[in-house]
Image: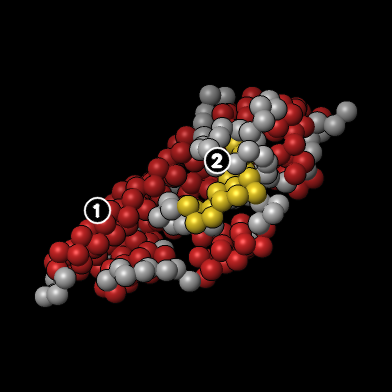
Amino acid sequence: MQEEFGDKLQVILVESQGTGYEKSIAFALKAGWLGGNTIWTSQRPFETGMNGIPNFALFDASGKIVLKGYSTQMHNEIVDNIEQMVRKQDFGSMPKSVQKVYKELNKGKIASAYAMAEKVIAKPGSKNTTLIVSAAEASLAVVRGRFDSSVTKVKWLMQNGYPIKALDVSKDLAKSVAKNDAMAEEASALVDRLESDEFKEQMKLDKKVTKLEYSMYANKKSDDRAISKLSDLKESAGDSEISIRIKELLAFSKYAIKR
């Protein structure tokens, strides 16, 4: 479902038994939990209140818990709820003018959604003015938060050795905010930096590292040859940001190797 729905769904898998990094990362690789949009972690983000595993909590887009329990017992309910939330968003009693803001944002049109929210705030109409303005201001904060989180994502990718992915995200962001001067300037600055000589060598290394990385993910294992190639690339990377990524790959590839 993560592959099917993409950014509309975020799956987070949590190892909660204190297995340890070495065994956990090897298991995650073998299970195919690495290399996609699914997040794997050994840090438990919250308590579900369940006494056994595997258990789960399903949140809607606002952060409200929609469903929780044991995933092996409630699989069909999980699937039904996810499909319902992804395919048709329930806005409840939200003013229709504000619903349009969220619908526009869901299309990836950040600047357009921002302008729509500002327009509603400026001209809320003569009925339920306070309610509409309050809802519109909340939507404006959500839209701004979407932009800020996208900028943060690009910067994280830059700082952790994913320049190609950072450039792709920054270009998409620049396109989505083209009609908002302030946002467009910030997004364009990210694109310009990533296309400059500063990241030229890292872009080349990124292609090589990504090829080895996805080979490991596809095969669900590592080998001495991959480790040797990664070690060579680490020497080439020096102290650049991509060396951080190579170091992490070397760590779990050694744990996952089959001897």
In front: 62, or 103?
A: 62
- Label 2, secondary structure: give it: loop
Q: Residues within 10 Å of mark 1 (few under 14, many from 20)?
A: few
The mark tally for this picture is 2
Q: Is residue 115 left or right of residue 165?
A: left
Q: Which residue is mark 2?
A: 49
Tag 1: residue type?
Ala
Q: Give residue 182's mark.
A: 1
The picture quadrant where one finds residue 242 is top right
In the picture provided, is 218 more to the left or to the right than 179? Answer: right
Q: Where is residue 184? Give x, y as percent.
A: 30, 55
Q: Nearer the viewer, mark 2 or mark 1?
A: 2
- The foreground one among 17 and 249 is 17
Label 1 SS: helix
Q: Is residue 233 left or right of residue 94?
A: right
Q: Position of residue 146 (x, y in %)?
A: 37, 53
Location of residue 248 (image quadrant): top right
Q: Nearer the viewer, residue 50 or 86?
A: 50
Q: Amino acid at mark 2?
A: Gly
**Residue 163 in sight:** yes
In the image, residue 234 lies at what x, y percent? 64, 27
